[in-house]
Every structure is written in C-alpha cells, then in structure tokens.
Amino acid sequence: MISNGNTKIGAIPNFSLPAIKTCPGQTDFCPVFCYGLRGHFTHRSREAMLERNYGRSQQDNFVSRMIRSIQDNASLVFRIHVVGDFYSPQYIQKWAEIVVALPAVNFYGYTRSWRCPDLKEALDNLRSYPNCYLLASIDFTHIDMPDACWNTVSVEGEGAPCPHDTEMIETCLTCGLCWSGRVNLKLKVKWFSKRKNLSPLLI
C-alpha cells in the first residue's frame, strides 16, 4: 500500500488514491492541472495500484494494515496522499486512528476536502492531533476560502515560496516546513513557466 517517495518529497513513505475520483473538494483547476493525471501516474501499473489502494481504504482492516506498514517502514514522517484526497468521514476517521496509534510519526498532507461541509468535522478532528499537519489546498479559481484556523498551500497564489520550488532544498525530507507548525506556502505549477499561461486553459 505504501510508496517510497519521489524526486520532490524524497524518501518519505506515502499513501495515495486515484486523482479526481477521490477528490470531492476539487475545483475547475483540478482536472486540468492535477499532476496526478500526468507522467508516471498515468502508467497502467500505477493506476492499478491506486485503484487497489482505494479498495483497501474501504476495508475493515485498513487501519491495522496501515499501522503495520508504517511501523515496518520505520520512518518518522509520512505523507498522506501525494495524489487523491479524503473522500468520506469514515475514511478520515480511519486516518485519525492511525495517527493516534503512531504518535512518534509526523503525518502531513494537502487537502481540498475542507470545501465539503460533510467532511469538516472529521477533518478538524484529524488535524487536531499534534502529530498531524494538514494544509488547505487552494488555487486562483477559488471563490470560497478555508476558515482562518487553516494553514494553506496555494497554487500560484499567496504565501511563502516552497523551498523546493526555489531550489533552496533538495527534497521535502530535508526541509520539513510542512510538518513544522503554522505555515502558508505557495507552490508553482511546474509545467508552465508563467502565471499568465494558466487562466486561458481552465475549463
């Protein structure tokens, strides 16, 4: 179930789900620019793995299996969703049980599910744990915005530049900013060089 990182996050184990399908808080930006719809995520084997993960996430033994997998990996940092998102209150509760069971592990991730009223309570509970750091993902198409209590990661918007985007650090593992506390970050869309290229391509 667990993947072992990539060129951006480094050797941080992570768990992902199919993009868009598991993203109830998506905006018009998402089906156009989501990196989960590009590159190696479109390989048949990777798509099959993400679908298997989706099925596993709905099983009763998901929590116990994930706890064992993270323990076997012995990492002190874990990324929830490189692609995909929190799709139901029941699924979010499973992550809360995992986070509570592994207090020495720092869990972090970005989510647009903050936009879904039926997921708000479960997300607030999950991010209340001291070892879980969730940032509200936003982009320049948003009319709605997260509550002020959320830290944000903004695509081509406001916030401190991501140190990886500005080549200040090699990987997320050597940075740690996303799981260090209160931070608002700005990310780049890597496959376009200038902000003016983006708006005409939105749906």
Image (spheres, helix red, strand yellow):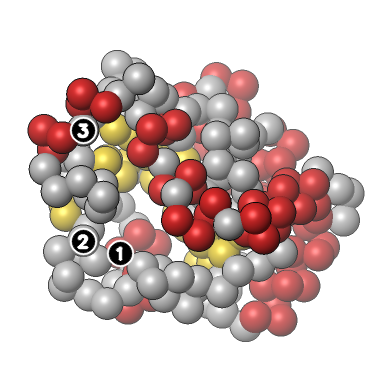
Specify whether 106 is left or right of 152.
Answer: right
> Tag 2: Cα neighbours inside 10 Å, few (<14), some, or many (≥20)?
some
Q: CA distance from mark 2 to mark 3?
A: 17 Å
Spot occupied by residue 200 in the image (x, y as percentages of width and height): 21, 24
> Tag 3: Cα neighbours inside 10 Å, few (<14), some, or many (≥20)?
some
* Residue mark closest to the camera, 2 vs 3: 3
* Kind of residue sitting beneath label 2: Asp
Spot occupied by residue 59 in the image (x, y as percentages of width and height): 86, 48
Q: Which residue is mark 1?
A: 177
Q: Earlier in the sequence, mark 3 or mark 1?
A: 1
Residue positioned most to the right: 60
Secondary structure beneath disc 3? loop
Task: State whether residue 81 is above or below residue 18.
Answer: below
Q: Nearer the viewer, residue 189 or 24?
A: 189
The label number, if any, that marks residue 165 in the structure image: 2
Q: CA distance from mark 2 to mark 1?
A: 13 Å
Name the residue at 57% across, 64% down.
14
* Residue mark closest to the camera, 2 vs 1: 2
Secondary structure beneath disc 2? loop
Q: Which residue is mark 3?
A: 198
Q: CA distance from mark 3 to mark 1?
A: 27 Å
